[in-house]
Amino acid sequence: MTTTRWKIGLAIALTSISMAIRLSGDKTAPGLAVVAFGVGIVAVSFLLAWGAEVAQLDVSASLATAALALVAVLPEYAVDLYFAFTAGHRPSYGAYAAANMTGSNRLLIGVGWPLVAVLFAVWARRTGRAERSISLRPRRRVEIAFLGLASLYAFVIPLKGSLGLMDAGVFLGLFAAYLFRTSRQESEEPDLSGVSADLAKLPPTARRATVVGFFVFAAVYVALVAKPFADALIDSGRALGMDEFLLVQWVAPLASEAPELLVAGILASRGNDDTALGTLLSSKVNQWTMLVGSLPLAYLAGGGHGSLVLNGRQVEEFLLTAAQALFAVSVLLRLRFRAREAAIIFVTFALQLVLPSTAVRLWLAAGYVVLAVVLFAVEVRQIIPTFRGAFQAVDEDPV
Protein backbone atom coordinates (compact mmCIF):
# COMPACT_ATOMS: atom_id res chain seq x y z
CA MET A 1 0.00 0.00 0.00
CA THR A 2 2.99 2.28 0.52
CA THR A 3 3.81 2.09 -3.19
CA THR A 4 0.21 2.92 -4.03
CA ARG A 5 0.26 6.01 -1.81
CA TRP A 6 3.51 7.09 -3.43
CA LYS A 7 2.05 6.72 -6.94
CA ILE A 8 -1.13 8.61 -6.07
CA GLY A 9 0.88 11.35 -4.37
CA LEU A 10 3.15 11.65 -7.41
CA ALA A 11 0.19 11.91 -9.77
CA ILE A 12 -1.35 14.71 -7.70
CA ALA A 13 2.02 16.47 -7.36
CA LEU A 14 2.52 16.44 -11.13
CA THR A 15 -0.70 18.40 -11.56
CA SER A 16 0.37 21.07 -9.07
CA ILE A 17 2.78 22.94 -11.38
CA SER A 18 0.23 23.43 -14.16
CA MET A 19 -2.50 24.17 -11.62
CA ALA A 20 -0.33 26.90 -10.12
CA ILE A 21 0.30 28.37 -13.58
CA ARG A 22 -3.42 28.34 -14.32
CA LEU A 23 -4.56 29.89 -11.04
CA SER A 24 -1.82 32.52 -10.90
CA GLY A 25 -2.41 33.71 -14.45
CA ASP A 26 1.34 33.49 -15.08
CA LYS A 27 2.21 34.05 -18.74
CA THR A 28 4.53 31.07 -19.05
CA ALA A 29 6.23 30.50 -22.41
CA PRO A 30 3.88 28.45 -24.62
CA GLY A 31 6.32 25.56 -25.01
CA LEU A 32 6.81 25.19 -21.25
CA ALA A 33 3.06 25.53 -20.71
CA VAL A 34 2.39 22.68 -23.14
CA VAL A 35 4.80 20.45 -21.20
CA ALA A 36 3.39 21.45 -17.80
CA PHE A 37 -0.25 21.02 -18.81
CA GLY A 38 0.50 17.85 -20.80
CA VAL A 39 2.24 16.20 -17.84
CA GLY A 40 -0.66 17.23 -15.61
CA ILE A 41 -3.21 15.71 -17.98
CA VAL A 42 -1.26 12.45 -18.12
CA ALA A 43 -1.15 12.37 -14.31
CA VAL A 44 -4.83 13.11 -13.83
CA SER A 45 -5.69 10.53 -16.50
CA PHE A 46 -4.02 7.90 -14.31
CA LEU A 47 -6.23 8.97 -11.40
CA LEU A 48 -9.28 8.62 -13.64
CA ALA A 49 -8.16 5.19 -14.87
CA TRP A 50 -7.60 3.91 -11.32
CA GLY A 51 -10.88 5.35 -10.10
CA ALA A 52 -12.83 4.00 -13.07
CA GLU A 53 -11.50 0.48 -12.51
CA VAL A 54 -12.27 0.46 -8.78
CA ALA A 55 -15.72 2.02 -9.29
CA GLN A 56 -16.84 -1.16 -11.02
CA LEU A 57 -16.99 -2.80 -7.58
CA ASP A 58 -19.66 -0.39 -6.33
CA VAL A 59 -21.74 0.71 -9.31
CA SER A 60 -24.46 -1.25 -11.07
CA ALA A 61 -23.57 -2.60 -14.50
CA SER A 62 -25.71 -0.21 -16.56
CA LEU A 63 -24.75 2.88 -14.58
CA ALA A 64 -21.08 1.88 -14.63
CA THR A 65 -21.17 1.49 -18.39
CA ALA A 66 -22.61 4.97 -18.86
CA ALA A 67 -20.58 6.77 -16.20
CA LEU A 68 -17.22 5.14 -16.80
CA ALA A 69 -17.43 5.68 -20.56
CA LEU A 70 -17.70 9.41 -19.86
CA VAL A 71 -15.15 9.59 -17.06
CA ALA A 72 -12.37 7.62 -18.74
CA VAL A 73 -12.17 9.97 -21.72
CA LEU A 74 -12.80 13.23 -19.87
CA PRO A 75 -9.41 14.86 -20.62
CA GLU A 76 -9.65 14.16 -24.33
CA TYR A 77 -13.24 15.38 -24.55
CA ALA A 78 -12.59 18.56 -22.60
CA VAL A 79 -9.85 19.74 -24.96
CA ASP A 80 -11.72 18.84 -28.14
CA LEU A 81 -15.04 20.30 -27.00
CA TYR A 82 -13.23 23.52 -26.06
CA PHE A 83 -11.98 23.81 -29.63
CA ALA A 84 -15.48 23.15 -31.02
CA PHE A 85 -17.08 25.60 -28.56
CA THR A 86 -14.56 28.33 -29.44
CA ALA A 87 -15.15 27.70 -33.15
CA GLY A 88 -18.68 28.98 -32.58
CA HIS A 89 -17.31 32.54 -32.27
CA ARG A 90 -13.78 32.04 -33.69
CA PRO A 91 -14.25 29.96 -36.88
CA SER A 92 -10.53 29.20 -37.24
CA TYR A 93 -10.76 26.92 -34.20
CA GLY A 94 -12.99 24.54 -36.15
CA ALA A 95 -9.87 23.10 -37.77
CA TYR A 96 -8.37 22.32 -34.37
CA ALA A 97 -11.53 20.52 -33.25
CA ALA A 98 -11.32 18.24 -36.28
CA ALA A 99 -7.56 17.78 -35.81
CA ASN A 100 -7.85 16.74 -32.17
CA MET A 101 -10.74 14.37 -32.81
CA THR A 102 -9.18 12.62 -35.81
CA GLY A 103 -5.80 12.39 -34.09
CA SER A 104 -7.15 10.76 -30.95
CA ASN A 105 -9.20 8.27 -32.95
CA ARG A 106 -6.37 7.24 -35.26
CA LEU A 107 -3.88 7.07 -32.40
CA LEU A 108 -5.94 4.44 -30.56
CA ILE A 109 -5.86 2.09 -33.54
CA GLY A 110 -2.57 3.08 -35.17
CA VAL A 111 -0.46 2.84 -32.01
CA GLY A 112 -2.60 1.12 -29.38
CA TRP A 113 -3.60 -1.99 -31.34
CA PRO A 114 -0.10 -2.82 -32.66
CA LEU A 115 1.35 -2.16 -29.18
CA VAL A 116 -1.02 -4.71 -27.67
CA ALA A 117 -0.25 -7.22 -30.43
CA VAL A 118 3.52 -6.93 -29.94
CA LEU A 119 3.41 -7.18 -26.14
CA PHE A 120 1.05 -10.15 -26.26
CA ALA A 121 3.30 -11.91 -28.80
CA VAL A 122 6.29 -11.36 -26.50
CA TRP A 123 4.32 -12.87 -23.60
CA ALA A 124 3.26 -15.83 -25.75
CA ARG A 125 6.84 -16.49 -26.83
CA ARG A 126 8.12 -16.22 -23.27
CA THR A 127 5.51 -18.67 -21.97
CA GLY A 128 5.90 -21.11 -24.87
CA ARG A 129 2.42 -20.51 -26.31
CA ALA A 130 2.16 -21.60 -29.95
CA GLU A 131 -0.68 -19.22 -30.90
CA ARG A 132 0.56 -15.63 -30.72
CA SER A 133 -2.30 -13.77 -32.39
CA ILE A 134 -4.86 -12.01 -30.21
CA SER A 135 -8.19 -13.77 -29.71
CA LEU A 136 -11.35 -11.88 -28.81
CA ARG A 137 -14.39 -13.32 -27.06
CA PRO A 138 -17.65 -13.42 -29.05
CA ARG A 139 -19.15 -10.67 -26.87
CA ARG A 140 -16.65 -8.24 -28.47
CA ARG A 141 -18.85 -8.41 -31.56
CA VAL A 142 -20.95 -5.71 -29.90
CA GLU A 143 -18.06 -3.22 -30.04
CA ILE A 144 -17.05 -4.35 -33.52
CA ALA A 145 -20.61 -3.96 -34.80
CA PHE A 146 -21.09 -0.44 -33.45
CA LEU A 147 -17.64 0.62 -34.63
CA GLY A 148 -18.58 -0.65 -38.08
CA LEU A 149 -21.92 1.16 -38.14
CA ALA A 150 -20.35 4.43 -36.99
CA SER A 151 -17.53 4.09 -39.52
CA LEU A 152 -19.91 3.49 -42.41
CA TYR A 153 -21.93 6.57 -41.53
CA ALA A 154 -18.75 8.60 -41.01
CA PHE A 155 -18.12 8.54 -44.78
CA VAL A 156 -21.14 10.82 -45.13
CA ILE A 157 -19.31 13.64 -43.30
CA PRO A 158 -16.48 14.22 -45.82
CA LEU A 159 -18.95 13.87 -48.69
CA LYS A 160 -21.01 16.83 -47.48
CA GLY A 161 -18.11 18.67 -45.87
CA SER A 162 -19.78 19.50 -42.59
CA LEU A 163 -20.77 18.12 -39.21
CA GLY A 164 -24.28 19.11 -38.15
CA LEU A 165 -27.16 18.29 -35.87
CA MET A 166 -28.35 15.35 -37.96
CA ASP A 167 -24.88 13.83 -37.70
CA ALA A 168 -24.87 14.48 -33.96
CA GLY A 169 -28.19 12.65 -33.69
CA VAL A 170 -26.83 9.61 -35.56
CA PHE A 171 -23.54 9.37 -33.64
CA LEU A 172 -25.07 10.03 -30.22
CA GLY A 173 -27.89 7.62 -31.06
CA LEU A 174 -25.33 4.93 -31.83
CA PHE A 175 -23.56 5.70 -28.57
CA ALA A 176 -26.81 5.41 -26.61
CA ALA A 177 -27.61 2.12 -28.33
CA TYR A 178 -24.10 0.87 -27.57
CA LEU A 179 -24.52 1.71 -23.88
CA PHE A 180 -27.88 -0.05 -23.84
CA ARG A 181 -26.43 -3.20 -25.42
CA THR A 182 -23.39 -3.35 -23.17
CA SER A 183 -25.46 -2.68 -20.05
CA ARG A 184 -27.48 -5.82 -20.81
CA GLN A 185 -24.40 -8.02 -20.89
CA GLU A 186 -23.56 -10.00 -17.81
CA SER A 187 -21.31 -8.06 -15.48
CA GLU A 188 -17.94 -9.55 -14.62
CA GLU A 189 -15.67 -9.16 -11.62
CA PRO A 190 -13.01 -6.65 -12.71
CA ASP A 191 -9.46 -7.95 -12.98
CA LEU A 192 -7.60 -5.38 -10.89
CA SER A 193 -3.88 -5.01 -10.36
CA GLY A 194 -1.41 -2.51 -8.93
CA VAL A 195 -2.94 0.67 -7.52
CA SER A 196 -6.49 -0.38 -8.40
CA ALA A 197 -6.10 -3.70 -6.58
CA ASP A 198 -4.79 -1.96 -3.46
CA LEU A 199 -7.65 0.55 -3.47
CA ALA A 200 -10.14 -2.31 -3.85
CA LYS A 201 -8.94 -3.69 -0.50
CA LEU A 202 -10.01 -0.55 1.37
CA PRO A 203 -13.21 -0.62 3.46
CA PRO A 204 -16.22 0.19 1.25
CA THR A 205 -16.76 3.69 2.63
CA ALA A 206 -13.10 4.66 2.28
CA ARG A 207 -12.91 3.10 -1.17
CA ARG A 208 -15.94 4.98 -2.46
CA ALA A 209 -14.75 8.24 -0.94
CA THR A 210 -11.37 7.80 -2.62
CA VAL A 211 -12.94 7.11 -6.02
CA VAL A 212 -15.28 10.10 -5.74
CA GLY A 213 -12.31 12.22 -4.66
CA PHE A 214 -10.35 11.15 -7.75
CA PHE A 215 -13.27 11.98 -10.04
CA VAL A 216 -13.96 15.38 -8.48
CA PHE A 217 -10.29 16.35 -8.46
CA ALA A 218 -9.86 15.25 -12.08
CA ALA A 219 -13.02 17.04 -13.22
CA VAL A 220 -11.96 20.31 -11.59
CA TYR A 221 -8.43 20.03 -12.94
CA VAL A 222 -9.54 19.26 -16.51
CA ALA A 223 -12.09 22.09 -16.44
CA LEU A 224 -9.35 24.53 -15.39
CA VAL A 225 -6.59 23.47 -17.77
CA ALA A 226 -8.41 22.45 -20.97
CA LYS A 227 -8.47 26.01 -22.33
CA PRO A 228 -4.89 27.07 -21.46
CA PHE A 229 -3.51 23.73 -22.67
CA ALA A 230 -5.32 24.02 -25.99
CA ASP A 231 -4.29 27.66 -26.45
CA ALA A 232 -0.68 26.86 -25.49
CA LEU A 233 -0.51 24.20 -28.20
CA ILE A 234 -1.56 26.73 -30.83
CA ASP A 235 0.70 29.50 -29.51
CA SER A 236 3.73 27.22 -29.27
CA GLY A 237 3.22 26.07 -32.85
CA ARG A 238 3.15 29.65 -34.07
CA ALA A 239 6.14 30.65 -31.93
CA LEU A 240 8.24 27.71 -33.18
CA GLY A 241 7.13 28.00 -36.78
CA MET A 242 5.51 24.55 -36.62
CA ASP A 243 2.17 23.43 -37.99
CA GLU A 244 -0.16 24.00 -35.03
CA PHE A 245 -2.72 21.69 -36.68
CA LEU A 246 -0.28 18.77 -36.26
CA LEU A 247 0.53 19.73 -32.66
CA VAL A 248 -3.15 19.79 -31.77
CA GLN A 249 -3.74 16.56 -33.66
CA TRP A 250 -1.05 14.49 -31.95
CA VAL A 251 0.33 16.10 -28.77
CA ALA A 252 -2.96 16.60 -26.91
CA PRO A 253 -4.35 13.11 -27.72
CA LEU A 254 -1.01 11.50 -26.82
CA ALA A 255 -1.15 13.10 -23.37
CA SER A 256 -4.73 12.08 -22.64
CA GLU A 257 -4.48 8.58 -24.16
CA ALA A 258 -1.14 7.67 -22.55
CA PRO A 259 -2.56 6.00 -19.40
CA GLU A 260 -5.05 3.97 -21.42
CA LEU A 261 -2.33 2.78 -23.79
CA LEU A 262 -0.14 1.92 -20.82
CA VAL A 263 -2.89 -0.07 -19.07
CA ALA A 264 -3.71 -1.98 -22.27
CA GLY A 265 -0.02 -2.69 -22.77
CA ILE A 266 0.35 -4.06 -19.23
CA LEU A 267 -2.68 -6.31 -19.71
CA ALA A 268 -1.28 -7.64 -23.00
CA SER A 269 2.14 -8.29 -21.45
CA ARG A 270 0.37 -10.46 -18.84
CA GLY A 271 -1.46 -12.52 -21.45
CA ASN A 272 -4.88 -10.81 -21.11
CA ASP A 273 -5.30 -10.36 -24.86
CA ASP A 274 -9.10 -10.01 -24.94
CA THR A 275 -9.19 -7.46 -22.14
CA ALA A 276 -6.25 -5.48 -23.52
CA LEU A 277 -7.55 -5.07 -27.06
CA GLY A 278 -11.16 -4.94 -25.88
CA THR A 279 -10.38 -1.92 -23.71
CA LEU A 280 -9.00 0.02 -26.67
CA LEU A 281 -11.83 -1.19 -28.90
CA SER A 282 -14.44 0.08 -26.43
CA SER A 283 -12.65 3.42 -26.11
CA LYS A 284 -12.58 3.74 -29.89
CA VAL A 285 -16.34 3.20 -30.05
CA ASN A 286 -16.87 5.84 -27.36
CA GLN A 287 -14.75 8.42 -29.15
CA TRP A 288 -16.01 7.60 -32.63
CA THR A 289 -19.63 8.07 -31.54
CA MET A 290 -19.97 10.30 -28.46
CA LEU A 291 -17.02 12.60 -29.12
CA VAL A 292 -17.84 13.15 -32.79
CA GLY A 293 -21.53 13.59 -32.02
CA SER A 294 -20.80 16.16 -29.31
CA LEU A 295 -18.77 18.50 -31.52
CA PRO A 296 -21.74 20.10 -33.37
CA LEU A 297 -23.50 20.68 -30.04
CA ALA A 298 -20.43 22.38 -28.56
CA TYR A 299 -20.13 24.48 -31.71
CA LEU A 300 -23.72 25.70 -31.42
CA ALA A 301 -23.29 26.34 -27.69
CA GLY A 302 -20.31 28.56 -28.51
CA GLY A 303 -22.38 30.78 -30.77
CA GLY A 304 -22.06 28.94 -34.05
CA HIS A 305 -24.84 28.81 -36.63
CA GLY A 306 -25.80 25.79 -38.68
CA SER A 307 -23.21 23.05 -39.15
CA LEU A 308 -19.52 22.94 -38.30
CA VAL A 309 -18.04 23.36 -41.78
CA LEU A 310 -14.92 21.35 -42.66
CA ASN A 311 -12.24 22.68 -44.99
CA GLY A 312 -10.28 20.56 -47.44
CA ARG A 313 -7.67 19.43 -44.89
CA GLN A 314 -10.31 18.46 -42.35
CA VAL A 315 -12.28 16.54 -44.97
CA GLU A 316 -9.15 14.52 -45.81
CA GLU A 317 -8.47 13.82 -42.13
CA PHE A 318 -12.05 12.70 -41.52
CA LEU A 319 -11.98 10.48 -44.60
CA LEU A 320 -8.71 8.86 -43.53
CA THR A 321 -10.00 8.30 -39.98
CA ALA A 322 -13.20 6.67 -41.25
CA ALA A 323 -11.25 4.47 -43.67
CA GLN A 324 -8.82 3.33 -40.98
CA ALA A 325 -11.72 2.45 -38.66
CA LEU A 326 -13.49 0.47 -41.41
CA PHE A 327 -10.31 -1.51 -42.11
CA ALA A 328 -9.95 -2.15 -38.37
CA VAL A 329 -13.47 -3.61 -38.30
CA SER A 330 -12.73 -5.85 -41.28
CA VAL A 331 -9.64 -7.41 -39.66
CA LEU A 332 -11.60 -8.32 -36.53
CA LEU A 333 -14.47 -10.13 -38.25
CA ARG A 334 -13.06 -13.50 -37.19
CA LEU A 335 -12.29 -12.20 -33.70
CA ARG A 336 -8.58 -12.50 -34.36
CA PHE A 337 -5.86 -9.85 -34.58
CA ARG A 338 -2.69 -11.14 -36.18
CA ALA A 339 0.85 -9.82 -36.48
CA ARG A 340 0.62 -8.96 -40.18
CA GLU A 341 -2.53 -6.91 -39.60
CA ALA A 342 -0.88 -5.10 -36.71
CA ALA A 343 2.10 -4.37 -38.95
CA ILE A 344 -0.11 -2.93 -41.71
CA ILE A 345 -1.93 -0.69 -39.24
CA PHE A 346 1.25 0.62 -37.64
CA VAL A 347 3.19 1.18 -40.88
CA THR A 348 0.32 3.04 -42.52
CA PHE A 349 -0.13 5.14 -39.38
CA ALA A 350 3.58 5.98 -39.33
CA LEU A 351 3.45 7.03 -42.99
CA GLN A 352 0.86 9.67 -42.10
CA LEU A 353 3.32 11.23 -39.67
CA VAL A 354 6.40 11.01 -41.86
CA LEU A 355 4.63 12.14 -45.04
CA PRO A 356 1.78 14.47 -43.97
CA SER A 357 0.66 15.40 -47.48
CA THR A 358 -2.73 15.40 -49.16
CA ALA A 359 -1.69 12.75 -51.66
CA VAL A 360 -0.51 10.37 -48.92
CA ARG A 361 -3.71 10.82 -46.90
CA LEU A 362 -5.92 10.14 -49.90
CA TRP A 363 -3.89 7.12 -51.07
CA LEU A 364 -3.89 5.65 -47.59
CA ALA A 365 -7.64 6.19 -47.25
CA ALA A 366 -8.20 4.47 -50.59
CA GLY A 367 -5.89 1.61 -49.57
CA TYR A 368 -7.75 1.10 -46.29
CA VAL A 369 -11.10 0.97 -48.10
CA VAL A 370 -9.87 -1.48 -50.75
CA LEU A 371 -8.37 -3.78 -48.12
CA ALA A 372 -11.55 -3.57 -46.05
CA VAL A 373 -13.73 -4.48 -49.03
CA VAL A 374 -11.48 -7.45 -49.84
CA LEU A 375 -11.58 -8.71 -46.25
CA PHE A 376 -15.35 -8.23 -46.06
CA ALA A 377 -15.66 -10.31 -49.25
CA VAL A 378 -13.36 -13.04 -47.93
CA GLU A 379 -15.06 -13.16 -44.53
CA VAL A 380 -18.58 -12.60 -45.85
CA ARG A 381 -19.99 -15.35 -43.60
CA GLN A 382 -18.84 -13.41 -40.53
CA ILE A 383 -20.61 -10.16 -41.45
CA ILE A 384 -24.12 -11.11 -40.31
CA PRO A 385 -23.01 -12.68 -36.97
CA THR A 386 -20.88 -9.60 -36.28
CA PHE A 387 -23.43 -6.91 -37.02
CA ARG A 388 -26.17 -8.93 -35.35
CA GLY A 389 -24.24 -8.14 -32.17
CA ALA A 390 -25.54 -4.59 -32.33
CA PHE A 391 -29.11 -5.79 -31.89
CA GLN A 392 -29.15 -9.26 -30.34
CA ALA A 393 -27.49 -11.06 -27.46
CA VAL A 394 -24.11 -12.50 -28.43
CA ASP A 395 -23.42 -16.17 -27.72
CA GLU A 396 -20.19 -16.96 -25.93
CA ASP A 397 -19.64 -20.16 -27.89
CA PRO A 398 -16.23 -20.38 -29.56
CA VAL A 399 -16.10 -19.20 -33.15
Image (spheres, helix red, strand yellow):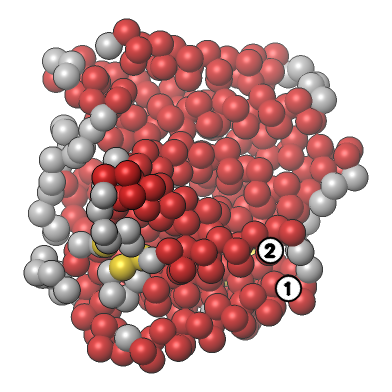
State the residue position of label 2. 352
What crowding class fits label 2: few (fewer than 14 Cα within 10 Å), some (14-19), or many (20 or more)?
some
Label 1–label 2 contact, CB within 8 A:
yes
Residue at the far top in the pictured view: 2
| Residue at x-position 24% and y-position 20% | 198
| Residue at x-position 69% and y-position 78% | 362
Viewer can see residue 266: yes
User: Which of the two residues, 377 or 384, is positioned nearer the viewer here?
Assistant: 377
SS at mark 2 in the image: helix
The quarter of the picture where residue 391 lies is bottom left
User: Which of the two residues, 91 or 319, is positioned nearer the viewer here?
Assistant: 319
Tell me the distance, in whole angstroms, between the alpha carbons under discs 1 and 2.
7 Å
Q: How many marks?
A: 2
| Residue at x-position 55% and y-position 78% | 368
SS at mark 1 in the image: helix
What crowding class fits label 1: few (fewer than 14 Cα within 10 Å), some (14-19), or many (20 or more)?
some
Instruction: Kindly identify the amino acid type of the residue bearing the numbered disc 2.
Output: Gln
Q: Position of residue 194 (x, y in %)?
A: 30, 25
Q: Is residue 26 left or right of residue 305?
A: right
Q: Quadrant of the image for the N terminus?
A: top left
User: Which of the two residues, 221 or 388, is positioned nearer the viewer here?
Assistant: 388
Q: Is residue 289 left or right of residue 196?
A: right
| Residue at x-position 19% and y-position 67% | 138
Q: Position of residue 259 (x, y in %)?
A: 46, 36
User: Does residue 262 lie above or below 161 as drawn?
Assistant: above
State the residue position of label 1. 360
The quarter of the picture where residue 289 lies is bottom left
Lower sequence index among marks 1 and 2: 2
Q: Position of residue 372 (x, y in %)?
A: 47, 82
The quarter of the picture where residue 146 lies is bottom left
Instruction: Kindly identify the amino acid type of the residue bearing the numbered disc 1.
Output: Val
